[in-house]
Amino acid sequence: MTVLNIGVIGCGSIAKHRHLPEYANEENVKIAAVCDIVEGRAAEMAETYGAKPYVDYKGLLQDPSIDAVSVCLPNSLHAPVSIAALDAGKHVLCEKPMATSKQEAEDMITAAERNGKKLMIAHNQRFVKSHQKAKQLIESGELGKIYSFRTTFGHGGPEGWSADGKDSWFFDRERAFIGAMGDLGVHKSDLIRYLLGEEIKEVAAMVETSAKENTDVDDNAVCVLKTESGTIGTLTASWSYVADEDNSTIIYGEKGILRLEDDPVNSLVAQYANGDVVKYELGQIQSNDEGGQTSSHVIENFVNCIVSNRPSPVSGEEGARSLDVILAALEANETKSVVTTNLVVQR
């Protein structure tokens, strides 16, 4: 059995609650190294998982025994550290958003190709059972032509989740680049592309900083998206949902409506034009509130693509296309215009 030696760069909440425990559950994985600029944080995770601690990621990358790394750092560091890891001969799983610009995203893709290594972006919503079932129903033609959609991701903000609370890098534009749109919105641009199987071509948006006093990054955004076939819909990302998290999506089709993660019991509800209603209990989508108890399935898919030498299930190209929608939304807000996406990468 092939055993992968894994390094995790960044030991904040996403690593502590997702990456590290999910790697630990993989039988063909050894967590060999962890890294964080906060020495105590790295030491704690090293002790928990029997790994070697680092405070400088460059030292970790110099270890030839490490096969792959997770990059769980502030957004501004995703591209430079991922590229350094790929150039050091490591496979890379990078948290979202993959980069802060189109050029950075393209440089990451080029680095993976140059070194013959896997690059995967951690868009976990593709692995949610209700989303996968909905994609099957759409592809089968059961809904007929898709007319519209609405997708939203909102919660009370990263201060309740991040290791640094209200002092988190999420609120610092220099390190985060974008706020709720990068934290939550990019998940939904990726999901809509995945569900509909086509690209978003036009974007309009209103992006505001209205809920948080300690930041100058966006915390509320409403976007209007149009696909290449003409389907229109809305995408909402917010750090102002102070009661319950909303991670729902609704697809409106010619023959019916799909409600995804919109019901507390039935994770997918199909309502058909003839009056039929089909309810699917597929397990609820994972959330920060449940403390990482439910697997995101990101890690197992990353590990399997390396061990089986299969294409990355969420490639750099896919991550770049989903990022491009968010970048277009920011531009649309700034220019008060409809922006056409124009990223050229191979599918």
Image: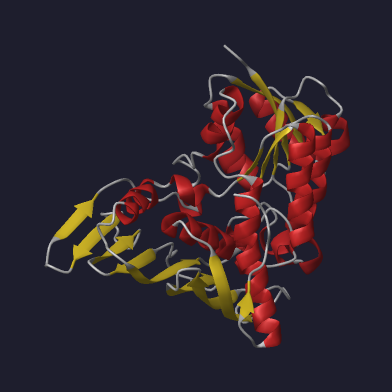
Name the residue nearer the viewer: 56 or 276. Answer: 276
Give the residue displayed 68% in from the left and 59% down from the top. 344
Q: How many marks?
A: 0
- Left or right of 331? Residue 193 is left
Query: How far across and down, in percent of the image, does residue 240 sit?
Result: 53, 74
Left-right relation of 284 to 58: left
Quadrant for the N terminus in the image: top right
Q: Is residue 258 left or right of residue 50?
A: left
Camera-nearest residue between 269 and 272 = 272
Residue at image coords 65%, 64% = 324
On screen, 211 above or below 156?
below
Q: How is the image coloured?
A: secondary structure
Could you tell me if residue 197 is visible in this image? yes
**Farthest-out residue, bottom:** 336
In the rendered view, tell whether residue 63 sits above or below residue 342. above
**Residue 144: image location, x then y, percent:** 27, 63
The front one of 73 and 117 is: 117
Q: Position of residue 124 (x, y in %)?
A: 52, 48
Residue sitting at the far left:
275
Residue 168 seen from this side: no
> Is 86 placed above or below 254 here?
above
**Residue 308: image location, x then y, percent:** 56, 23
Q: In the image, what residue occupies the spot 62% across and 82% down?
A: 210
Q: In this view, does 175 lie above or below 285?
A: below
Which residue is painted at 16% across and 60% down in the image? 277
